[in-house]
Structures are given as structure tokens and as C-alpha cells.
Amino acid sequence: MKSLKFKGKVFKYGDDVNTDVIIPARYLNTSDPKELAAHCMEDIDDTFASNVKEGDIIVAGENFGCGSSREHAPISIKASGISCVIAKSFARIFYRNSFNIGLPIIECPEAADNIEFGDLIEVDLEEGIIRRVSDNKLFKPKPFPDFVKEIIVKGGLMEYVSSKQS
Amino acid sequence: MGMTISQKILADKAGKKEVQPGEIISAKVDVALGNDITAPIAIKLFEKYEGKKLFDNEKVVFVPDHFTPNKDIKSAEQCRILREFAKKHNVKYYFEIGRVGIEHALLPDKGIVLPGDLVIGADSHTCTYGALGAFSTGIGSTDLAATMMTGEIWLKVPESIKFVYNGKLQPFVSGKDLILYTIGLIGVDGANYKSMEFTGDVIDNLPIDGRLTMCNMAVEAGAKNGIIAPDETTLKFVDKRKRREYSAYQSDPEAEYSDVIEIDCSNLEPQVSLPPSPGNAKSVRELSDIFVDQVVIGSCTNGRLRDLEEAAAILKGKKVNPNVRLIIFPATQEIYSEALKRGLIEIFIDAEAVIGPPTCGPCLGGHMGILAKGEKCVATTNRNFVGRMGHPESEVYLAGPSVAAASAITGKITHPEEVV
């Protein structure tokens, strides 16, 4: 099971960040994670792919990931090095896809309102705490539903399904 | 305890007498759909996790429609993965070029999706089939892979919002205008995680093509599914096409809704959603002098026969404005053929439009209609996000076929009554 603690610098975005700006359709003729990561967030922030570092965290507003069912969106975010995404709310299909591929996503409106671009933050999913390093300010995200925890514990949907099949 | 139509279908597929909103169920799937963008990832996962056999080779459907005819070598390779897997596993409903169409127009026309079905598709507009009284929802590639192995999917039973459309529609107002207006009213996350159930006199009188358009865009309000209870219109449509038996469900009168929204449609004008959100809906009369470079008529939202007829009624005997490129793409081979027989294609060519093959290409900025920097397009498609149809600084205005056709003639966003 992978670690549920993350620390990184914040990339901050607004409401309704959609799958087309996360990974434009013109790049969907491949499903190679590295190629997708090279164009991640390109149409909303063309400096993202060159600036993001392993462990960094995306913080955004309402309805993150709205639009297409393309799993390429969470795949490109994960492959870019982002450790988790915190938002006020997530679009439904993006929410499922993220857990299915093992990209942790966290609903926390208070954190999304307070955390700024460039902040250094720590996330502890086991404790259910987000901490800003500069002033030790704490935010408490909503706990995950039980079925989501089960998928996380197994390491993703396919591991979960194949463990049931064998 | 009353149940909505969505609850009834999910209860049936979960083998339960009843289900409540919020409940997590494992449900049996009638149709699992993938396309040339989403299925290759699902196939790789299926093979990585040693899936040996599809749960049912008649219930897994592959439609290579997004980048076909292949736009480049990479997309050709993606399609090859699909083609070879379909052959190896004897997938009954795999549609090669020449027989293909845009998935959400193709499946209803071929009688593959039916009332009472649980349909999951690795494409967000899978919610289209709710127009036939199915519970259908979009998922991603990993969910598709898991379903291909097990035939089941876990779902949270959604709350439902009931929309009641009353009144008499004005000329040129269609299903697209109803849904754009509705998304404008509740916002792009107004139905997040919920079911949108469309009812009322206006829906009763709406043809099946308009119903498919409405359910198609439920996802643009964040909904898990859009749904319309089957009636005579539905049964007339499906009985000609069905390949198996089906169950038609209705919501109970005492079913509970998280919200009931009544909309008087009598004064509703044709709608246009301004970029960059389907939620920016305005009456076409509120807009002035928005000049456009391109008009696109087609897609899984509005590429059906009735959409082409609406466009042809406006374009007949007229020419596309010299400053505009009009691209029309019928959604399936069958629609294309019928449009030919009815003389619609001739009207379009005489008007100096270009006719594309059945493909999703232009809608998602894939190929065959990419916008340059600063260009504006009126499109009957479903999304107008930043960069949707090409350059991040291009703009897409969403509208129905009549407004799109009228705009192609004048070169600016136009109420259809101005050109007929």
C-alpha cells in the first residue's frame, strides 16, 4: 500500500477546471502517461508542465475535472508528479477515475479558499489533515466514503477487482 | 415507498426490490461501451490483469469514432488495438469505418440500447440513452476494464431532480434550446452526482431526436444521468430496432425528488451558450453582432436526421456567407444515406457547405474543423471549453441547428426568423 502522506508546493486554479484544459483532445491520440504529462494543464497554464515537481499539489475551486470521461486527465496529472488534488468539489466521472488509477483527491472547501499559489503544504490522508507549513494552519477535509477507502487500500480498482476474481 | 425510474432500473440491475439515494450497489450492466480514445486504455488494463474472457461478447460495444478516419499514425495505432482485440474476443458490436457512426447516435439507431437497460460507457455523453428510458452514465477506462471482466459496476444511487417543461414551443425552439436554457438555469454543476429526469407536456411532444439531445447534455450540468420515461414515441422508435426484449419503467407518483424545477417554455427563445461554458446560455435576441468564422452542424448532440432537416430548411436556396466555413457531419452512415435520399445533402452542397464523414473529429478539436487563434465558431456540439475546437484563444458558441444554419448565412449569430 502506498504512503498516504504528501508534501509539496501548491499550484492553484479556480472553478470548473475541465478535462479539456487538463489535457486537450489534440493529444489524446496516445495513452502514454509521459507524453500526456508533457501537455498537462497546457490550455489553462502553459508553464505548469515545466515547473511542476514530484510531490506538488493542485488546489482548485468547485467542480474540478468537469467534462469528458477521458482518464487521460487524471493520468496526466499523476504522471506529471502531482501527489494529490484538493478542491471544493469534483465532477463525478473525474472523481471515480482518479481513485481508480490511484490519484488521491480531496474535497475541502476551506482549504481551497485559504491556500494560495506557491504555499508549501502537507497532507496526511490517514489522519485526515491538511497543514500549511508557513503558519501551521490546519484544514480538515471530509472523510472518504467507505467504498473509496476499500479501493485505496487495495491499491486501485483493477487490483480490487482482480483480487475478487482469483 | 415510491421510486424514480432511475431507482427502479438500478434496483432491478442490483437484484433488489428497492434502492435508496446514497446507497452503494453493485449492478449488472447491459451494455459497456468504449471508443478509440478510451477503449485502448481499458484493453491494456484488461490484458495486464489477465482478463481471459469478456463477460459477454454481445454486451461490450466498441465504436472507433473520435479520430477516424484515422487522423495520424498514433490514432491509427490506437484503432488497431481496438480492432485486434475486437476480433480476438469476437466482439459482436464493433463498427469499422464504412459501418461506423458517432457512438451515441449509432447505438440507439442500431437497437443496441433499450429502455430499462443499465448502460455504462467510457465517454461522458453516454448519458444520451436516457432518452430511451435507460439508466446510462459515463465512466472512465478503468471502470470499463473492470466491467469488461465482471459484467458489473459499483454505483451510488443518485438523488433525482425532476424538471417539468410546460407550454407551447415557439418556432425554431428545439431540444437543444431546452437543455441549454436548463444548464444556464442550474449551472454546470447544478446537478452534480444527480439524475436529471425530464418531464412535462413539452417533453411528451418532443420527438426522439430532441430527447436524445437533451439527455446528451445532462453531463454538462454535472449529472450522473439524464432520463425520460418511455412513452409511445419511445416505443415506436425502439420496437422497429430492438435486438432483444426490454422493460419500460416509469417513476412512481409518490417518488421523492431532491428538487422539482418547473419551466414555462412558452416564451423561450432559441438559446446560445457563450464561451467558455455550456452554462453561459442567453437568448439569441440578447446577442448582437457576434461575427463568426466557422459553423459546425453535427456531433452526438445534433447530428441526427431531424437536426439536418432543421438546418436544411434554413439553408435551402441560400449560400453560406463568404466569410464563413460551414461544416456539416451526419452522425451515422444511415443518417447520411437518408439525408441523401431526402435531398438534404444537395441543399447543403448547393449552399456551399462541406460534408464530413460520421466522426467526432470537429467537436473535440480532434480533426476536420480545427480553429485558428482568435477564430469564432457556432457549433451544434456540446462543449465550448477553452481550446475545445482548436487554439486556446478560439471561441465556440453552442446553439441548435436552426441558429447555426442561420448564422452560416449571415456570418454572425442570428435568429433563424431573420433569414427565412
Image (cartoon, coloured by chain):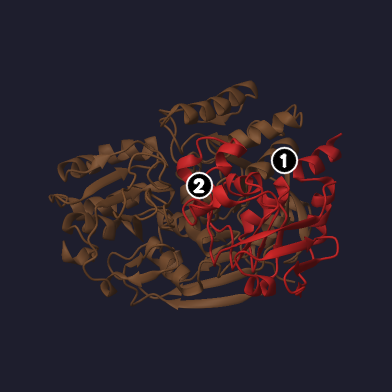
Residue visible at 38% across and 63% down in the picture:
B275
Residues under labels 2 and 1: Cα distance? 29 Å
Residue B109 visible somewhere in the drawing: no
Q: What residue would you read off at disc 1?
A: B146
- Which chain comes out red in the rendered image? A
Residue visible at 34% across and 67% down in the picture:
B271
Q: Which circle marks residue A28 in the picture?
A: none
Q: Is residue A155 above or below residue A126?
A: above
* Closer to viewer: mark 2 or mark 1: 1
Q: Earlier in the sequence, mark 2 or mark 1?
A: 1
Q: Nearer the viewer, residue B12 or A26?
A: A26
Q: Position of residue B378 (x, y in %)?
A: 30, 56
Residue visible at 57% across and 71% down in the picture:
B162
User: In the rendered structure, which amino acid carries the disc numbered 1?
Assistant: Ala
How packed is label 1: few (under 14 Cα within 10 Å), some, or many (20 or more)?
Answer: many
Q: Is residue B19 above or below residue A111?
A: above
Q: Which circle marks residue B238 in the picture?
A: 2
Question: Quadrant location of the N terminus of chain B?
Answer: bottom right
Q: How many marks?
A: 2
Residue B336 visible somewhere in the drawing: yes
User: Which colour denotes chain B?
Assistant: brown
Q: Is residue B289 left or right of residue B336?
A: left
Q: Nearer the viewer, residue A60 or B267?
A: A60
Residue B84: quadrant of the picture: top right
